[in-house]
Amino acid sequence: MQARGPLMIEHRLIERMIAVIKDALAQIQSSGKINPHFVDTAVDFIRIYADRTHHGKEEEILFHDLDKRPLSAYDRSIMNELIQEHVFGRHTTKALVDANTRYRNGETAALNEIADKLNTLVGFYPKHIEKEDKVFFPASRKYFTGDEDQAMLAEFREFDRKMIHEKYESIVKVLEKPK
Ligand SMILES: [Fe+2]
Ligand SMILES: [Fe+2]
């Protein structure tokens, strides 16, 4: 498997979650409410899987390695766009968490903002994924030899291996905080 293989497999799971969020948006429209626990689950998926685990491999390994190579001006501009889109996704998710907290605390008007942020994520991810799958990943492959690509695949696997430990260590740390 090429190094981009796991990234593209992860894209498919992100797309499935985006389809679930689309269904939730239709339910908001018809029922005028949302279960805040659903938003918690969607946020956990976006933060831990899509951002930390998936964007983490892209930024800390693929983009980091590419940054040291003689990228064409066009490829570098696409990479910078992708990095900015990751930042945009983080800001949108933070706003979604804030709106969900307000909604949970009884501010029913926050539902509009929850729907708006979910809608933003539903619009943003498929375009971002398509740009990587069809444009950037194929273009970036030429900057690596076959051996380098396989070494990156091994780095991806090592990165993933740490993720479950990182997640649960962070949960314990939060719970340990003095009240
Ligand atoms: Fe990305
Ligand atoms: Fe990606």
Image: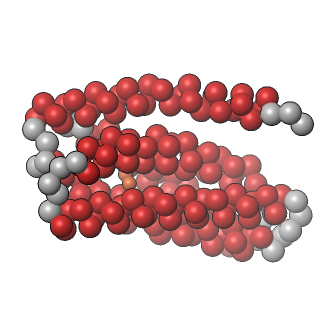
Task: Please tell me which residue is depicted at 75% across the width and 69% down the height of the picture.
Answer: 111
Res 81 quadrant in image: bottom left
Nearest to the observer: residue 7 or residue 141: 141
Task: Please tell me which residue is depicted at 55% across the width and 42% down the height of the picture.
Answer: 48
| 101 w.r.t. 107: above or below | above
- Residue extending farthest front: 68
Is 64 on the left-hand or right-hand side of 168?
Answer: left
Task: Please tell me which residue is depicted at 29% across the width and 60% down the height of the picture.
Answer: 79
Task: Please tell me which residue is depicted at 66% across the width and 69% down the height of the picture.
Answer: 115
The x, y position of residue 27, in whole percent, is: 67, 65
Using the rendered image of the protein, determine whether residue 124 is visible from the camera's viewpoint: yes
| 88 w.r.t. 45: above or below | below
Screen quadrant of the N terminus: top left
Is 47 on the left-hand or right-hand side of 12?
Answer: right
Res 33 quadrant in image: bottom right
The x, y position of residue 43, in whole percent, is: 62, 51
Res 129 quadrant in image: bottom left
Is 119 on the left-hand or right-hand side of 53?
Answer: right
Is 18 on the left-hand or right-hand side of 95?
Answer: left
Screen quadrant of the C terminus: top right
Using the rendered image of the protein, determine whether residue 126 is visible from the camera's viewpoint: no
The x, y position of residue 165, in whole percent, is: 56, 25
The x, y position of residue 98, in whole percent, is: 73, 61
| 57 w.r.t. 109: above or below | above
